[in-house]
Amino acid sequence: MTQERVALVTGGTRGIGAAISKGLKAKGYKVAANYGGNDEAANAFKAETGIPVFKFDVGDFAACEAGIKAVEAEVGPIDVLVNNAGITRDGAFHKMTFEKWQAVIRTNLDSMFTCTRPLIEGMRSRNFGRIILISSINGQKGQAGQTNYSAAKAGVIGFAKALAQENANKGITVNVIAPGYIATDMVMAVPEDIRNKIIATIPTGRLGEAEEIARAVEYLAAEDSGFITGSTLTINGGQYIA
Ligand code: NDP
């Protein structure tokens, strides 16, 4: 890197986000990791990595504006944004409450606006930016029991395609990573029998590792990845070939 770039990773203290934060730090980025509410995990992550943590709810625009301002004041203007924070609230649609629907849309899709809008003008004025959005295999293929999550994660892909077109002439790339099933708290919370059934549908015969997603983020964030924009990188062990 010609200069030390600053990266913000939302949901960057646990799971895939933690691997991304650590991976970017190892590549020489100044990293800030956001989280939502788990102070214990965030403090343990900070103690282990030395990466500063910033608590704000990615579903709340005012909180994101303030949180991103704090990151930029403490760490520097953000060059790389990884919109990774996400949740699931699964259930059959005919039983789904509006609360479950809204919670998932808010955290997984509203966050595309709330976390990107406050910093994109800065990226445009500096003629450089790397925006990397974490979608999901289930946004590509749909998943029974996840109408809310599938809708949000498909929305992320549409958002990226439009945003990529708007900002390509400003040195800003916008790309999506669509992970398959990765061994994090989110997936380990799925009952073991169901998890084993999922693994049986993955041609590689295993769950992915968070570090395998982190490596792809590092690639898309790089200075010399400037011709890759509007793309969706599928990383799922061959489970769904889009
Ligand atoms: P985890 O549940 O392990 O971690 C989620 C992270 O997001 C935590 O740091 C959490 O913070 C943060 N977060 C959740 N809600 C908010 C919020 N409202 N505001 C700020 N931060 C929040 O998830 P994974 O690592 O498994 O998933 C990361 C991303 O990858 C998600 O977008 C997920 O949908 C996607 N994904 C995951 C797959 C998998 O198999 N694991 C597959 C495909 C996509 P806190 O610790 O405070 O709760």
Image (cartoon, rainbow, N blue to C red):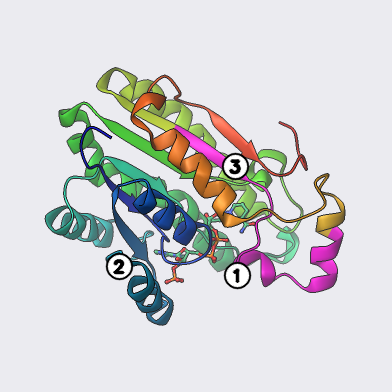
Taking the spot 86% from the left edge, 60% from the top edge, the residue there is 197
- Kind of residue sitting beneath label 1: Asp
Whether residue 152 can be seen here: no
Callouts 3 and 1 close, C-beta under 8 Å: no
Taking the spot 77% from the left edge, 73% from the top edge, the residue there is 191
Q: Tell me the quadrant of the picture where the N terminus can be found.
A: top left
- Kind of residue sitting beneath label 3: Ala
Please say whether residue 193 is one of the residues in the magenta stretch.
yes
Callouts 3 and 2 close, C-beta under 8 Å: no
- Report the disc number at residue 185: 1
Question: On the image, which quarter does residue 186 sit in?
Answer: bottom right
From the top left corner, tell me how far across and down residue 240 is, in percent.
76, 39
- Kind of residue sitting beneath label 2: Gly
The numbered mark, 2 or 1, whose residue comes first in the sequence reads 2
- Report the disc number at residue 178: 3
Q: Tell me the quadrant of the picture where the C terminus can be found.
A: top right
Disc 2 versus disc 1: nearer the observer: 2
CB of residue at label 1: within 8 Å of ligand 1? Answer: yes
**Residue nearest the viewer, comparing 14 with 122:** 14
Image height of 18 relative to 123, above or below = below
Taking the spot 37% from the left edge, 25% from the top edge, the residue there is 224
- Report the disc number at residue 50: 2
Label 3 and label 1: CA atoms lie apart by 18 Å
Q: Is mark 3 on a helix, strand or loop?
A: strand
Image height of 30 relative to 167, above or below = below
CB of residue at label 3: within 8 Å of ligand 1? Answer: yes
Q: Is residue 174 left or right of residue 100?
A: left
**Magenta region: which residues?**
175-197
From the top left corner, tell me how far across and down residue 114 is, in percent.
33, 50
Structural crowding at the residue carrying mark 2, measured as other residues with C-alpha within 10 Å and reported as few (<14), some (14–19) or many (≥20): some
Structural crowding at the residue carrying mark 1, measured as other residues with C-alpha within 10 Å and reported as few (<14), some (14–19) or many (≥20): few
The numbered mark, 3 or 1, whose residue comes first in the sequence reads 3
